[in-house]
Amino acid sequence: MSVSPSLAPPLGLGLDAGGTQTRWALADAAGRTVAQGHVAGLSGLQLAGTQGRVALAQTAHQLAFAVLPHGRPAGLYAGVTGVGEANGPAALQLKDILSQALGLQPARMFVGSDMDIAYRSAFAPGEGYLLYAGTGAIAAFIDAEGRMQRAGGRGALLGDEGSGFWIAREALALVWRREDEAPGAWRESALARRLFEALGGADWAQTRTFVYAGERGAMGRLALAVAAAAEADADPDARALLQRAGAELARLALALLKRYGARPVVAAGRALQLHPLIPQGLRAALPTGTALTVTHLEPHLTAAQLAARL
């Protein structure tokens, strides 16, 4: 027998939205996951332009199309990259877009930083430091008073060292510097061949269009080509770059260790899963005795549980 919508148990919708993809989950009041999946990336940075806002609306409707067949959520808890304060302008605009697509009242919605929900899926406030590396890179600490402290996370122009975007950017920069010195040198480089295969050609115009007209998430995914060159081809440049990425990520954790004292570090995010050399480089650059756990977090599940309580 079907249950009418008014009698169906309330569900919470959790979102973990990054530049590459948005992971979603529905949970019931007991915290059980009812359904989960993913759609295109969402970012508060997209609110800056008309094209970005159109893309946000499209992704919000794509989300509704994926979620609603499993049940209508009564509350939403979203962690979104590019969002600062939970009640700031970006959060309020995203609430409006998501409420229209999902039919939710803004009062039953929380939209905040993706790092807020990622941290809470790793630690209780005050317990430790979260180092998160995906398309971007940031270290975060929520103190015992609930205040978010951070290092990094300033975007590709000012930082994000060690992230997927940074790895791809550094790899392309290296390849094109060598092309300046010796045109055609890319043919002798496994790293260059992997990159150009992913881009669809070795012409500068293709690289230029990809880097300057493409999406940030696509640039982050290009790091997969660097990892393939390091693993399948044992390319020395790719391997050195991935090791360096780990050391760059360690710098973010070191900043929080210096500011707030010794605590355990949890490192997570898709960039850390690219290749073992990245966590190796990270571990080597941290002080001896630092408790480091490299793991896979599922913030969208934590977000769904929190949403069910709204």
Image (cartoon, rainbow, N blue to C red):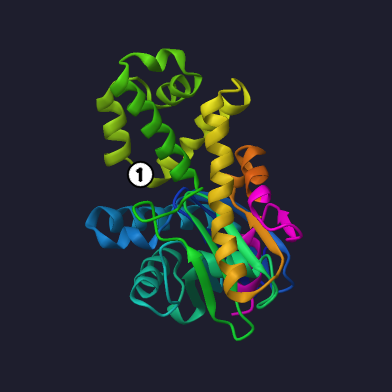
* Image: 62 above or below 240: below
* Residue closest to the far front: 288
* Image: 22 above or below 179: below
| Residue found at x 34% / y 13% | 184
- Where disc 1 sits, the SS reads loop
**On the rendered structure, is 270 left or right of 136?**
right
Could you say where residue 206 lies in the image, as x and y percent from the top left? 29, 27
Q: Which residue is mark 1?
A: 215
Quadrant of res 287:
bottom right
Could you say where residue 37 lies in the image, as x and y percent from the top left? 59, 51
Residue count near mark 1 (Cα–Cα under 10 Å), binned few <14, some 14–19, many ≥20: few
The quarter of the image holding the N terminus is bottom right
- Residue 72 seen in the current view: no
**On the rendered structure, is 264 left or right of 80?**
right
- Residue 281 seen in the current view: yes
* Image: 126 above or below 249: below
Could you say where residue 42 lies in the image, as x and y percent from the top left? 42, 56
Foreground pick, 240 / 125: 240
| Residue found at x 63% / y 44% | 281
Is 302 within the magenta?
A: yes
The quarter of the image holding the C terminus is bottom right
Disc 1 residue type (three-letter): Glu
The boundaries of the magenta stretch are 283-310
Could you say where residue 6 lies in the image, as x and y percent from the top left? 59, 75
Quadrant of res 192:
top left
* Image: 251 above or below 219: below
Quadrant of res 263:
bottom right
Foreground pick, 173 / 67: 173
Is 290 within the magenta?
A: yes
